[in-house]
Image (cartoon, rainbow, N blue to C red):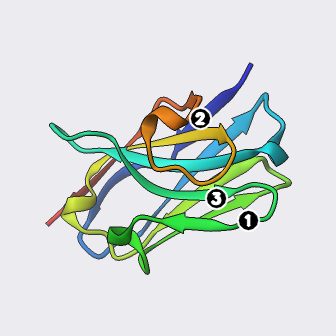
C-alpha cells in the first residue's frame, strides 16, 4: 500500500523559508519520480518541482526556479522541498505525488498523492 505523507507547512512572512517533507512508503523507489504540486484557493493544482529517485535529476516550474530546491533522502525514504524567499503568491496547499516514468507536469500523470500541507505566506 503506497503512502505519501506531507509535513512542514505553516504560516510565514514574505522572504522567509520553509522545508516541506514527504514520507513515502510501499513502493519501489528506484522506479519512481516524485513531484510537488500546489493548489491555491480557486485555482487549479499546478506542478512545482520533481525529482527522479534513481539519479536525483530535478525539474522546476519557472516561477520557483532559484528559490525552491527539491531533493530526496535515500536512507529516510523522504522527498523534500526547500522553499526560500517565499512570496504571498506561494500560498497554497502543497501536495506530494509519485509516478513511474519521467518528468510530467500534469496532475493526471501521477498515480499516488498525499493529503497535502498548507503553506501561507503573509505580506
Residue 119 marker = none
Find residue 56 and name its label.
Answer: 1
What is the tally of numbered marks visible in this picture? Answer: 3
Can you give x and y, in whole percent of width and height, for residue 61 in the image?
40, 64
The answer to the question of whether label 2 and label 3 lie on touching residues, with beta carbons closer than 8 A, is: no
- Dot 2: element: strand
The local crowd at label 3, few if under 14, some if 14 to 19, many if 20 or more residues have their Cα within 10 Å, is many
Query: Badge 3 is on which residue?
Result: 51
Pinpoint residue 102: horizontal percent, then vertical percent: 65, 52
Marks 1 and 3: in contact by CB < 8 Å? yes
In this rendering, the label closer to the viewer, 2 or 1: 1
Q: Earlier in the sequence, mark 2 or mark 3?
A: 2
Instruction: Rate crowding at label 2 as few (under 14), some (14 to 19) or many (20 or more) other CA atoms within 10 Å.
Output: some
Give me the C-alpha separation between circle 2 and circle 3.
17 Å
Label 3, label 1: how many angstroms apart (C-alpha)? Answer: 6 Å
* Quadrant of the frame with the N terminus: top right
The residue that label 2 is drawn on is 5
For the point 59% across and 35% down, the residue is: 5
Secondary structure found at label 3: strand
Q: CA distance from mark 2 to mark 1?
A: 20 Å
Q: Is residue 29 left or right of residue 14?
A: right
Residue 104 horizontal/vertical position (percent): 53, 49
Q: Name the residue located 53 percent from the left edge and 32 percent from the top edge.
A: 114
Chain-order first, disc 2 or disc 1: 2
16 shown above or below 98: below
Q: Are marks 2 and 1 in contact (CB under 8 Å)?
A: no
* Frontmost residue, 55 versus 5: 55
Amino acid at each position: 500500500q503506497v503512502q505519501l505523507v506531507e509535513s512542514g507547512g505553516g504560516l510565514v512572512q514574505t522572504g522567509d523559508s520553509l522545508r516541506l517533507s514527504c514520507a513515502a512508503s510501499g513502493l519501489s523507489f528506484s522506479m519512481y519520480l516524485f513531484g510537488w504540486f500546489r493548489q491555491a484557493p480557486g485555482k487549479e493544482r499546478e506542478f512545482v518541482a520533481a525529482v527522479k529517485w534513481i539519479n536525483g535529476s530535478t525539474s522546476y516550474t519557472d516561477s520557483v526556479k532559484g528559490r525552491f530546491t527539491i531533493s530526496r533522502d535515500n536512507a529516510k525514504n523522504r522527498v523534500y522541498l526547500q522553499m526560500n524567499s517565499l512570496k504571498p503568491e506561494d500560498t497554497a496547499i502543497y501536495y506530494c505525488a509519485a509516478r513511474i516514468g519521467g518528468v510530467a507536469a500534469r496532475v493526471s500523470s501521477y498515480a499516488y498523492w498525499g493529503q497535502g500541507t498548507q503553506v501561507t505566506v503573509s505580506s
